[in-house]
Amino acid sequence: MLDPIFGGAVVYICEHNPEGALGVIINKPTDMTMSTLLERVDLDLEIQPLNLPMGDSQILFGGPVQAERGFVLHAPFGQFNSMLPVTDNVSLTTSRDVLEEVAAGRSPRRLLVALGCSGWSAGQLEEEIVRNGWLTVEADPAVIFDLPVAERFTAAIKLLGIDPFMLSGEAGHA
């Protein structure tokens, strides 16, 4: 995809229903770190930044929708005000209380924080998939949480059995 936002993006789809779809880009870092984000939302870290579940890693760009809002993908952990269980292994939380737990050092070990999300209206994502705008693969929590951000695209493509270095953006004749 040649789109400046979605080109090379790995999007984890969190919700898909007749009204549309919502996802979070999991491989586009911003220049903001977790400790900077917590500072900006007026939360004092009760632990050292290096003791955070993801260290003092970068916050990701989750997509162009609600870019000022935080979207937290995490392993199931407790109950938060605005939490959506996505699978048995992944939940999505958008409420501040999850960040309060992170600041207090009581958060899940697997955690990814993004600003913004990606959204599609009813039928839009399906139409883009039919036009070969997206490759789809069953999500692997290890790709979401355990791999360095720079390795997630290649790992997701490899889940399809494709070597991404063999892909070409040009058509040819045999």
Image (cartoon, helix red, strand yellow):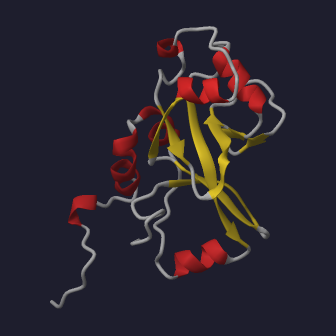
Numbered circles on residues, count: 0
Above or below, 47 against 15 in this view is above
Q: Confirm whether residue 151 shows in the render.
A: yes
Residue 75 x %, y % = 63, 31
Going 50% across and 82% down the picture, which residue do you hit? Answer: 131
Above or below, 27 against 53 in this view is below
Above or below, 109 against 21 in this view is above
Above or below, 40 against 163 in this view is above
Q: Confirm whether residue 90 shows in the render.
A: no
Image check: 95 left or right of 161?
Answer: right
Which quadrant would the N terminus be assigned to in this image?
bottom left
Going 28% across and 60% down the picture, which residue do you hit? Answer: 164
- 18 and 62: which is toward the camera: 62
Q: Which corner quadrant of the image does residue 121 belong to?
A: bottom right
Query: Which residue ends up furthest to the left in the rendered image?
Result: 174
Residue 152 x %, y % = 39, 46
- 91 and 61: which is toward the camera: 61
Going 43% across and 66% down the picture, which residue do you hit? Answer: 4
Residue 44 x %, y % = 66, 15
Residue 156 x %, y % = 41, 52
Query: Which residue ends up furthest to the right in the rendered image?
Result: 81
Which quadrant would the C terminus be assigned to in this image?
bottom left
Query: Which residue ends up furthest to the bottom in the rendered image?
Result: 173
- 7 and 37: which is toward the camera: 37
Going 54% across and 21% down the picture, which residue do you hit? Answer: 53
Image check: 162 left or right of 48?
Answer: left
